[in-house]
Image (cartoon, rainbow, N blue to C red):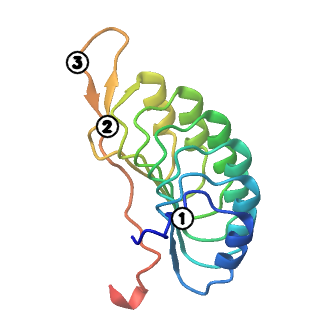
Amino acid sequence: MGSGEHLLQSLPADVATELAAWEGEWLRMSGITELDTDAAKELVTWDGRVLSLNGLLELGPDTAEALASWSGLTLELNGLPAMDSQSAEKLAHWQGWRISLNSVEQIDDDTAYALAGWEGDILSLSGLSMMNDDTAEALEAFEGALIVDGSAEVSRYDDTEPDTIPSVGPRLDPYRDSEDE
């Protein structure tokens, strides 16, 4: 980067409006660490397939609710270190195909129940490193493919050896045309 250039870390609503007019399939903004609700409301008018906001460091309930109104297929939020239950409840209303939350290392039971209630096809939480029995049970209720990459350990309250949770469910790809198979 030159001396006069700056990395955009927060997305202003007027810039989000301009980006929403773009006709591409994939919008990747991994340098954005902050997204306010007004900018999210403008951004979700974009008519693409993959919205990648992998630099976000937090997601409040109002912004999650705004993102849930987007009509695309894949929502990547892989930079979020945590997800609270209120934001998860709002995000669970999204009608898309895949949510990726691969930097979230731990979630509580309420957040797990909220995410498990999402009716999409693939929920990717491959960053999970530890969960208790209740959280694991909540995630088992997810009806799509749950991706945790087999690395999450379930801590048992009775101090027995932890179990690993494998990835489960079918692998669907809406990007592949049926004639490619």
Q: Is residue 104 visible?
A: yes
* Horizontal side, residue 18 vs residue 74: left or right: right
- Toward the top, the furthest residue is 158
Residue at horizontal 35%, vertical 49%? Answer: 168
Residue 32 in the image: above or below residue 5: above
- Position of residue 71 measured from the top left corner of the image (x, y, whole percent): 66, 70
Q: Residue 161: which numbered mark, if any?
A: 3
- Horizontal and vertical percent position of residue 142: 51, 45
Q: Mark on residue 82?
A: none
* Residue type, mark 3 in image: Glu
Q: Position of residue 159 (x, y in %)?
A: 29, 10
Query: Crowdedness of circle 2 by 10 Å Cα count: few (<14), some, many (20+)?
Result: some
The residue singled out by tag 2 in the image is 165
* Distance from Cα at disc 3 to Cα at disc 1: 35 Å
The kind of secondary structure element at disc 3 is loop
Q: Where is residue 123? Give x, y as percent.
A: 47, 52
Determine the CA span between mark 1 and mark 2. Answer: 22 Å
Q: Residue at x 59, y 34 (%)?
A: 84
Q: Given the image, on which type of amino acid does mark 1 rest?
A: Trp
Residue 75 occupies quadrant: bottom right
> Which residue has dot 1 on it?
97
Q: Is residue 68 visible?
A: no
